[in-house]
Image: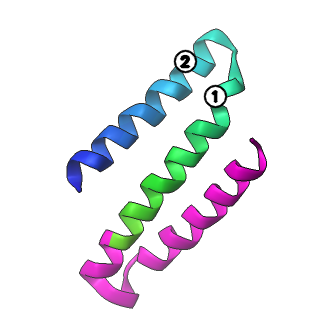
């Protein structure tokens, strides 16, 4: 799971840097979708570790919002 998180984070940063350097923001929705997936994975892990007292539910709700917004922007 840690490898997946690192790979998603690197891909999101690479796509975002590409967009900022070239001013081509056509890959923005893909970056947002991957960021939402990354937040969902982090939220699930946090929820499993600390239960309802941690940041897990906040990250899961945030990831759902990001994923929905990314899907509407395609």
Quarter where residue 40 is shown: bottom left
- Which quarter of the rendered picture does the C terminus lie within? top right
Q: Is residue 57 above or below residue 28?
A: below
Residue located beneath label 1 in the image: 27
Q: Is residue 18 above or below residue 72?
A: above
Q: Which residues are magenta?
A: 45-74
Where residue 57 sits in the image (x, y, percent)? 48, 79
Residue located beneath label 2 in the image: 18
- Left or right for 1, reference 14: left
Question: Is the stretch drawn in magenta largely helix, strand or loop?
Answer: helix
Look at the numbered disc 2 and give the secondary structure of its residue.
helix
What residue is at 31 percent from the left and 49 percent from the top? Answer: 5
Answer with mark 1 or mark 2, whichever residue precedes in sequence: 2
- Which quarter of the rendered picture does the N terminus lie within? bottom left
What residue is at 66 percent from the left and 63 percent from the top? Answer: 65
Quarter where residue 16 is shown: top right
Residue 62 colored in magenta in the image = yes
Task: Tell me if label 1 and label 2 are in contact, CB under 8 Å.
Answer: yes
């Amino acid at each position: 799971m840690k490898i997946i998180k690192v790979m998603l984070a690197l891909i999101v940063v690479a796509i975002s840097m590409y967009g900022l350097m070239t001013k081509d923001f056509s890959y923005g929705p893909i970056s947002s979708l991957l960021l939402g997936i990354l937040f969902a994975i982090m939220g699930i892990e946090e929820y499993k570790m600390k239960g309802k007292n941690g940041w897990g539910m906040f990250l899961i709700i945030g990831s759902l919002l990001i994923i929905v917004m990314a899907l509407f922007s395609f």
